[in-house]
Image (cartoon, grey):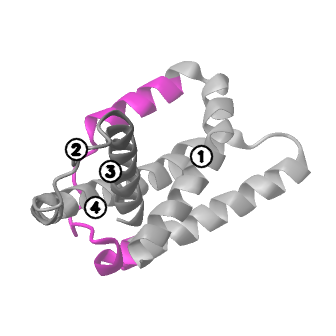
Amino acid sequence: MKSLTAILCALISIQCCCCSLSHSHHLCFNYAVFPAHIEELRTSYRQIKNYFDNHSCKFLKEMLNFYLKDVIPAARTHKRTINSHISKIGNALHELHENVQNCHQFFNCDLCSCNKVSYFKNIHRTFKQLQVKGVYKAMGELNTFIDWIWNYINMRRN
């Protein structure tokens, strides 16, 4: 929500700066309708917020399942030091998965365990088709997923 507000403020500032440069003697922004626009944005956002929160939660659950069931087991190697770190990653993801399962109110998740969304079927299919390269790709993108988890949980906390 804070980032949406910042983006809106930046866009308004840019618009006003451009207007003031080209129409310095005209009022370029109608402040009388500004509160109505903001209220419209807030009302519309409230109507769609739960939908996107729910999909974010489902995305988190599906990605955690994907890493726990497919990626982590396939990432094991013959090197003990690597396997030790892979196990630590798997354990942390498993604990997070349990927290998500137990904290439906915090994450605003449906209590159902609905069928996989079609894009996850595609992710699984692509992962299996890539074989070993799929493991490298998934492990290479783990940092992006970790960043997403961090941002998502902080957004939910705020």
Marks 1 and 2: CB-CB under 8 Å?
A: no
> Dividing the image into 4 quarters, which one contains the N terminus?
bottom left
Residue drawn at point x = 21 percent, y = 66 percent: 110
Amino acid on which the number 3 mark rests in the picture:
Ile
Q: Which residue is mark 4?
A: 53
Instruction: Give the mark nearest the N terminus, 4 or 3.
Output: 3
Q: Residues within 10 Å of mark 1 (few under 14, many from 20)?
A: few
Q: Callout 1: helix, strand or loop?
A: helix
Answer left or right for 86 relative to 144: right
- Mark 4 → mark 3, Cα distance in angstroms: 27 Å
Instruction: Give the mark nearest the N terminus, 3 or 2.
Output: 3
- Mark 4 → mark 1, Cα distance in angstroms: 19 Å
Amino acid on which the number 4 mark rests in the picture:
Asp
| 81 lies above or below 101 | above
| 130 lies above or below 71 | above
Amino acid on which the number 1 mark rests in the picture:
Thr
- Image location of residue 17, percent across then percent down: 39, 44
Return the mark for residue 91: none
Q: Which residue is mark 1?
A: 144
In the image, which is nearer the foreground, mark 3 or mark 2?
A: 2
Return the mark for residue 26: 2
Query: Which image quadrant for residue 15?
Result: top left
| 156 lies above or below 74 | below
Q: Residues within 10 Å of mark 4 (few under 14, many from 20)?
A: some
Q: Foreground: 63 or 27? A: 27
Instruction: Give the mark nearest the N terminus, 4 or 1.
Output: 4
Q: Callout 4: helix, strand or loop?
A: helix
- Image location of residue 55, percent across then percent down: 28, 53
Residue drawn at point x = 35 percent, y = 61 percent: 5
